[in-house]
Image (cartoon, helix red, strand yellow):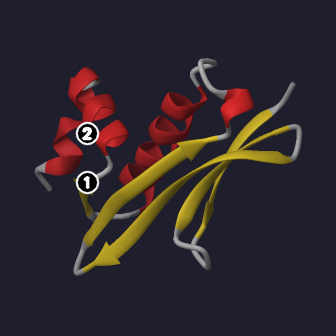
Amino acid sequence: MTTTVTNNPDQSRYEISIDGDRVGIAVYELGDNSINFTHTVVETDSRERGLGGTLIKNALDDVRANSTAKVIATCPFVVRWVSEHPDYQDLLDR
């Protein structure tokens, strides 16, 4: 089983796939040097496998590595995930 997370800027979302089948998305809106994660969803059949966390971790790692954008989290899942992973708090304070 191969899990991949990719940024799809044309759709303004990160996508998580298992063996090439998309099973979840994290939707974002770009602002002036910010990225606002507004909605995260993982298909019902794929829930409770940690895929939402994998999706957000990879998305935030990509933001950290490839931009100076401040992360804004309005999606409750992202808010909770970042609060549980203090090593990502710096992205909120850029």
Give the left or right position of residue 22, taking residue 67 as reference: right
Q: Residue at the location (57% across, 56% down)?
A: 14
Residue 79: assigned label: 2
Within the image, what quadrant is residue 51 found in?
top right
Label 1 neighbourhood size at 10 Å, few (<14), some (14-19), many (20+)? few
Q: Quadrant of residue 88?
A: top left
Amino acid type of the residue that numbered disc 1 sits on in the rendered structure = Thr
Q: Residue flagged by tag 2: what amino acid is it?
A: Val
Point out the residue furthest to the front here.
44
Question: Residue 25 at what x, y percent from top left?
Answer: 59, 52
Question: Relative to 83, is 5 on the left or the right?
Answer: right
Q: Distance of mark 1 from mark 2, alpha carbons?
A: 7 Å
Q: Identify the residue shown where x is 88% and y is 38%.
A: 19
> Which mark sits nearer the N-terminus, 1 or 2?
1
Q: Which residue is mark 1?
A: 74
The N terminus: image quadrant: top right
**Kind of element beneath mark 2:** helix
Splitting the image into 4 quarters, where does residue 4 fall? Answer: top right
Relative to residue 16, is residue 67 drawn left or right? Answer: left
Residue at horizontal 26 percent and vertical 56 percent from the top = 71
Q: Nearer the viewer, residue 92 or 81?
A: 81
Q: Position of residue 3 (x, y in %)?
A: 75, 34
